[in-house]
Image (cartoon, grey):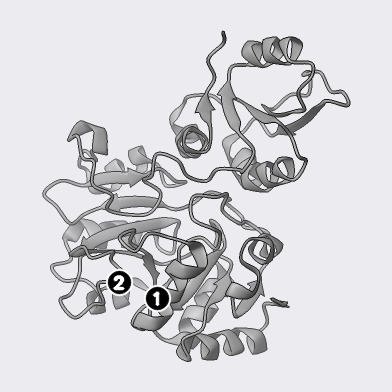
Amino acid sequence: MTIFNATSHTIEQAAQCLKKGGLVAFPTETVYGLGADAQNSEALKRIFIAKNRPQDHPLIVHLASFDQFDAWAHDIPDSAVKLAQHFFPAPLAIILKKRHDINTIVTGGQDTIALRVPNHPVALDLLRAFGGGIAAPSANRFCRISPTQAIHVQQELGERVDLILDGGACEIGVESTIIDLSGEHPMLLRYGQVMRSELEEVLNLNVLIPDVLRKSTVRTAGMMNTHYAPVTPAMLCESMAILHFVQANTQMNVGILSCGHDDFPSSAHCTVMSLPANPVGYAQSLYATLRELDTLKLDVILVETPPQTENWQAINDRLAKATHNFRER
């Protein structure tokens, strides 16, 4: 599949492709999305087939503005209005009760729908040109590493996509925050750049997390136990455990993803890649670096455990799902 630079002409081409039931990959501020007309059943089915995604796993619908939410959801609470006024456009998806006429394919058969207004000029121009909602999960095979560059989409999905818009590397690099406002209490279902403390400050309410209420039903994207994962086995390790592993397994080809330093041993059998020691820079480069390590035919990737503070929560969430915890023997 050819990659097209995002221009007014190619964006209009992409909008027409969507209107004809095609699949269009496009950039957002978080990751590249695999877009389809959110009201076209056959186009929506193509998303699930292209990604090998379970049909009960709901999609996020992207809209050009919050003004369009009432065409997709009913009984929109004041809390949603507050968040939209404060954050939108933003890496934030809001789950609400869906309207009865909304296609249940897009909601995974549930009575709720996830909506967001992306903060990326190409995504917003495409949404305006299209004129409706675009359902768009990440443009990769299900549970694999999300794409943050157009070339990643081409490598992952190839001819399964009708058109790829290239808007450069994604600014944030990890998926959006998801908050559920469809129930009695606001609930954070996925960590992202918009942090829980920021949501609570705007809402002046406690935002719960699923473990608090022991929820187990998959209600939205990114809640699988294994997700965002490379093909190469990957383990999350403290720095000393990485050193011990490398010393004890000299026959293995090892990749190391470090956090902010380059003092791990590098050799013919040990490839070290270092990411910035700040969460913004780390997130921007995380998926692209994991992809690069995944191409090196390694036996294992060892990921140094990042800090455990709130501004690292989204990163730690993604790493926890992409790796296994290391256990020394």
Rendered view: 253 above or below 60: above
Q: At x 61% / y 57%, what residue is drawn?
A: 147
Disc 2 secondary structure class:
loop
Q: Is residue 196 visible?
A: yes
Rendered view: 46 above or below 203: below
Give the labeled residue for mark 1. 44
Marked residue nearer the N-terminal end (2 or 1): 1
Q: Do the CB atoms of the residues marked 2 and 1 lie less than 8 Å apart?
A: yes
Q: Position of residue 62 (x, y in %)?
A: 41, 70
Rendered view: 290 above or below 251: below
Residue 156 lies left or right of residue 187; in this view the side is right
Q: Position of residue 199 (x, y in %)?
A: 32, 45
Relative to the observer, which residue lies in front, 16 or 196? 16
Give the labeled residue for mark 2. 105
Residue 13 lies left or right of residue 175; in this view the side is right
Type of amino acid under label 1? Leu
